[in-house]
Amino acid sequence: MSGDQFEYWKHTQSTIDVVQGRGSSFSLEIPMGIRFVIKSRIYTEQEMGELSSIHIGEV
């Protein structure tokens, strides 16, 4: 994720899930009979206050 993308999405919790079914475009989905679903929600103000500091560029 680029810095600009992170800036846009930093208030959002995203989860990638795998479910049975046919996907629409990702190369791994079609032969395996699965699809990826991205679920997201905005953090509450309380959750935002509890998040750790962000250190961009560190591993």
Image: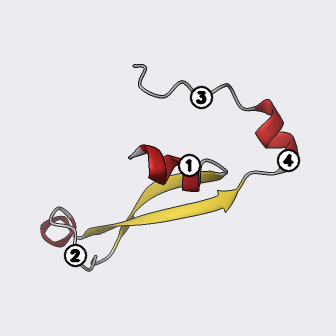
Nearer mark to the viewer, of 3 and 4? 3
What residue appears at the point 82 percent right and 51 percent down from the top-left corner?
A: 44
Which of disc 2 and disc 1 is earlier in sequence? 1
What residue appears at the point 17 percent right and 61 percent down from the top-left corner?
A: 28
Which of disc 4 and disc 2 is earlier in sequence? 2
Question: Crowdedness of circle 1 by 10 Å Cα count: few (<14), some, many (20+)?
Answer: few
Callout 4–callout 1 Cβ contact below 8 Å: no
Nearer mark to the viewer, of 1 and 2? 1
**Numbered label attached to residue 45:** 4
Nearer mark to the viewer, of 4 and 1? 1
Query: How far across and down, in percent of the image, does residue 10 sit?
Result: 60, 47
Which of disc 3 and disc 1 is earlier in sequence? 1
Q: Quadrant of the C terminus?
A: top left
Residue where numbered disc 3 is placed: 54
Query: Is 36 positioned to the left or the right of 33 in the image?
Result: right
Residue where numbered disc 1 is placed: 7
What residue appears at the point 56 percent right and 49 percent down from the top-left corner?
A: 7
What residue appears at the point 67 percent right and 51 percent down from the top-left corner?
A: 11
Nearer mark to the viewer, of 2 and 4? 4
Q: From the viewer's perspective, is residue 40 above or below residue 47?
A: below
Quarter of image, res 54: top right
Query: How far across and down, in percent of the image, does residue 12 sit?
Result: 63, 53
Callout 2–callout 3 Cβ contact below 8 Å: no
Q: From the viewer's perspective, is residue 41 above or below residue 44?
A: below
